[in-house]
Amino acid sequence: KARMGPHVAFLESFPALHRNGNLWFVHAGADPALPMEVQPETALIWGTPDFLQKKRRDNEWVVHGHVIVDEPIVRHGRIAIDTGAYATGCLTAMKVHGTEVSFLGERGQPNRDRDDEGPDNA
C-alpha cells in the first residue's frame, strides 16, 4: 500500500456494486440465489461457489472480472470481461449503449518480466 501512495484511497473509494438498468458491475461475482440489492460484500469482491455454475433467473446481468477468460463471455446472467491484461497483454472494455452491448479490446505486451519495484522499473 505504501508504494501505491494516494492511489490506495482512490481504489478504496469505489463502491462494491454499481447498477445501470439491469446491469450490475462488480469485481468478482454475486450469489445467484440472492437479489442484487442484498448481496454480501464478500460475494461481490470474491465471488461465490455457485456464481459460475448457476444461472441468474431474475433478468439481471452481472458484469464481472476476477476470472480470466480468453474473450468476453455473455451467458446465464453473467458477463465476464477480465481478459487478464497484466498476464496476457489484452485489455477488454465493455460499451453499453441503450440495450446494445459491445466489447473493445486492445492487445499489448504481457508484463511477465516486471519486478515488484513499481512502474519506474517496468
Image (cartoon, helix red, strand yellow):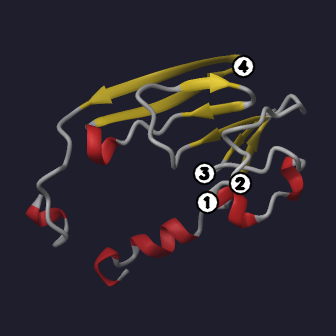
Separation of disc 4 and disc 1 at Cα? 29 Å
Report the amino acid beneath label 1.
Trp
State the mark number for residue 46.
1
Comparing marks 1 and 2, which lies closer to the viewer? 1
Separation of disc 1 and disc 2 at Cα? 13 Å
Q: Earlier in the sequence, mark 3 or mark 1?
A: 3
Say which residue appears at 50% left-offset and 44% top-offset. 67
Q: Earlier in the sequence, mark 3 or mark 4?
A: 3
Q: Earlier in the sequence, mark 1 or mark 2?
A: 2
Q: Residues within 10 Å of mark 1 (few under 14, many from 20)?
A: some
State the mark number for residue 17.
2
Depicted 45 relative to depicted 5: above or below: above
Q: Which of marks 4 and 1 is nearer the N terminus?
A: 1
Report the amino acid beneath label 2.
Leu
Comparing marks 2 and 4, which lies closer to the viewer? 2
Picture quadrant of residue 98: top right
Report the amino acid beneath label 4.
Gly
- On screen, residue 17 versus residue 106, left or right, reads right
Q: Residues within 10 Å of mark 3 (few under 14, many from 20)?
A: many
Find disc 4 in the rendering and name its residue: 98
Q: Earlier in the sequence, mark 2 or mark 3?
A: 2
Picture quadrant of residue 109: top left
Comparing marks 4 and 1, which lies closer to the viewer? 1
Image x and y of residue 80, in percent: 57, 34
Quarter occupied by the C terminus: bottom left
Q: Are marks 2 and 4 in contact (CB under 8 Å)?
A: no
Image x and y of residue 81, in percent: 51, 34
Find disc 3 in the rendering and name its residue: 28
Depicted 32 relative to depicted 44: above or below: above
Q: Which of 61 and 101 lies nearest the eye of the viewer?
A: 61
